[in-house]
Amino acid sequence: MTATNSSGGSGGAGASRGAARPSARELIEAIVDPGSWHGWDEPVEITTDDPDYRADLERARERTGLDESVITGEGRIEGRRVALVACEFRFLAGSIGVAAGERLVRAVERATAERLPLLAAPASGGTRMQEGTVAFLQMVKVAAAITDHKAAGLPYLVHLRHPTTGGVLASWGSLGHVTAAEPGALIGFMGPRVHEALYGEEFPPGVQNAENLMNHGLIDAVLPLSRLSGVAARVLRVLCAGEPAPASAAGTAPASGPGAAAAGPGRRGAGGGASTEPEPAPGAPGAARAAGDGAAPRASVAACGAAGLAGEARPGTPGDAPGADAWEPKGTAARGEGAEDGAEGRRDAEAGPSSVVHGYVAPGGRGAEQGAGGVATPEVAAGVGSAHDQAGVAAFAGASDGVGTPSVVPSAEVSIRASRRAERPGVRDLLRVAAEDVSPLSGTGAGEHDPGLLLALARVGGTPCVVLGHNRRSARKGDTAEGPGEGQALGPAGLRTARRGMHIAAELGLPLLTVIDTAGAALSREAEEGGLAAEIARCLADMVTLPAPTLCLLLGQGAGGAALALLPADRVVAARHAWLSPLPPEGASAILHRTTERAYEVAARQGVRSADLLAQGIVDRIVEEEASGFGGGGRSRAGDDSQVEGASGAPETSRAGDASRAPDVFLSRLGHLLGAELAALRAQDPGERLAARRVRHRRIGLGR
């Protein structure tokens, strides 16, 4: 882990290459609210006896106006206090020596002590070669401080700038809960110059760049500086649960010290540095939320930064692959319903197509009854009913005939056919309609990406949470509901991505929402050799022991181990036509009867329907899909109702009560209900909730 960029760790060519990029001060000015920056850095003396190194340091100081390669301090992003650490590449290629390492550690420790979210923006060649091994080991103590910060339940966001290599990338540059990168940035462990010197050949082109690493699941997004502040604010609205925290006098202090960035005009006209939001008074909606969090293992996450958060949240909508489109809402659709020009705490979203990756859209979000900071409070969740009874949810969701008492319970065949329709809404549609502040994450963060699993941070029904779900894609042209369909088969990488989401929820004390809608796991040599079965087992182990509140939504198909891996939650909500089985019904039929033609008959006997699951205590609540049950009708995307002949030979209506008829109506009500469920789980005593989860799973198959 050496200074691995083309500068060799001492400025020169590498520094000039990065000169056109924003400096650390310019970066900070662009991110924080105008006038809110306050530097934390104490002056650093030059103590080296090496005359050449002393001369290098003096020239770097003269060139940059800084006394070291890192700047640390705090500012506000849309009113929220945030700690920032940033490298200045023009200062000896942003390399880290003893003084820079100590400055970083002190800043991280202060952020942890003051319960501030931390944003890091490295641009560095790695270890400072002039200081040798002792500088090399600074990475250990910086990584340790970051680990302590995350263990305290505080968010850590990373924005990798051009270039980031060596020990910086291999320590604090790769530990973020969420990691973005500058477009076109060179990011890699070993820089091109060192590789050529050691191996006598150039490094393969197109590998060590931000876009390629995002496509391989190593980083979550590629973002230009103009979008960084808005995306960071959106992510923190979820990771910090939108809760205010006590303001510090430091938040309004003038910029000072050699590391302080001069206050200058900012891009956004909202959220002055002095704005704070008081703690909710006893009896206020926000107070009950805070009280509910008080007993949680990660309850302290509620106090990450002082949030003077005004204005509407800005949604994003995930698609098939992560990209800038997913991270930055665009145009008027991104503003949400009822947004006003010039609203405090907002700025106009940038228009135009993404310069990075296409595949996401950003329509307007939805509202929900919310408490302080936009969180669905236990008071709102009270509509669910203290005992989570069906009648409580019916009243809360606004159903006219009760969400759990349909006039006719559909057969297994009808539900399976309905779940396989190409028009049926999936997790992406759920986030589009029922969520806001959506920030998709890319892959495992360790070099793998599986399109079969979607991972995102979002507010669902007003409640901040981590969302992970099977990424249902429309069936290919010509596919029908007669078989399991192609969909997106879930492989080992998708399960490892799911475990990443579980760990984020555990570290930050956020509720976890899993969404099951899968035709099954991947069946291939690669999946077997990649440890598919072992990853399913690890997901099960993580889910049953996860300290965070967990809610499972059985939305559509639930075939095999791919579904089982996301099931063991505190509560399970099922759409009426959702189902769960050990195998796709065709597979079970082949085992039992050596033919797939008896699939629906086998499914009926296996008890796969939502009604069967409710009777067995596997599902806690069924949500009807009838548009009329939600107070309104709607036309099917695919036309009029049709009939199929059921296993008994009698015709059955196939489209009545099907979410594909009026998907947005269904998803809106469903999101409202999910937000209330999540808020109610979050308000429970953690010990009691975990104990109830274990009892719940211990009793499966023993009756209720």
Image (spheres, rainbow, N blue to C red):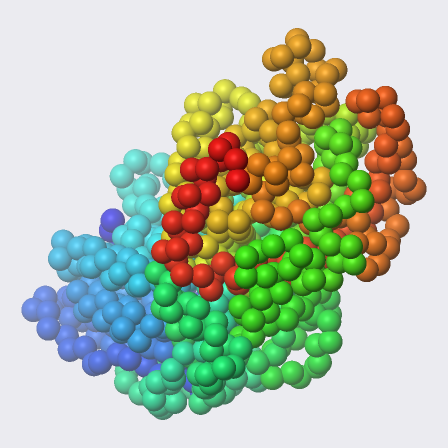
Q: Is residue 153 left or right of residue 559?
A: left
Residue 222 at what x, y percent from top left? 52, 56
Task: Give the number of callouts.
Answer: 0
Q: Nearer the viewer, residue 245 or 68?
A: 245
* Residue pictured at 50% horizontal, 20% vertical: 525
* Residue pictured at 28% horizontal, 80% vertical: 40
Residue 646 sits in quarter: top right
Tell me: residue 466, above or below residue 38. Answer: above
Residue 634 at what x, y percent from top left? 86, 53
Q: Nearer the viewer, residue 589 or 539?
A: 589
* Residue pictured at 20% horizontal, 81% vertical: 43
Residue 172 at what x, y percent from top left? 31, 57
Residue 141 visible in the snapshot: yes
Q: Is residue 197 left or right of residue 34?
A: left
Tell me: residue 527, above or below residue 676. Answer: above
Looking at the image, the residue that sits furthest to the left is 49
Residue 179 visible in the snapshot: no
Q: Is residue 556 left or right of residue 543?
A: right
Q: Nearer the viewer, residue 177 or 220?
A: 177
Residue 258 sits in quarter: bottom left
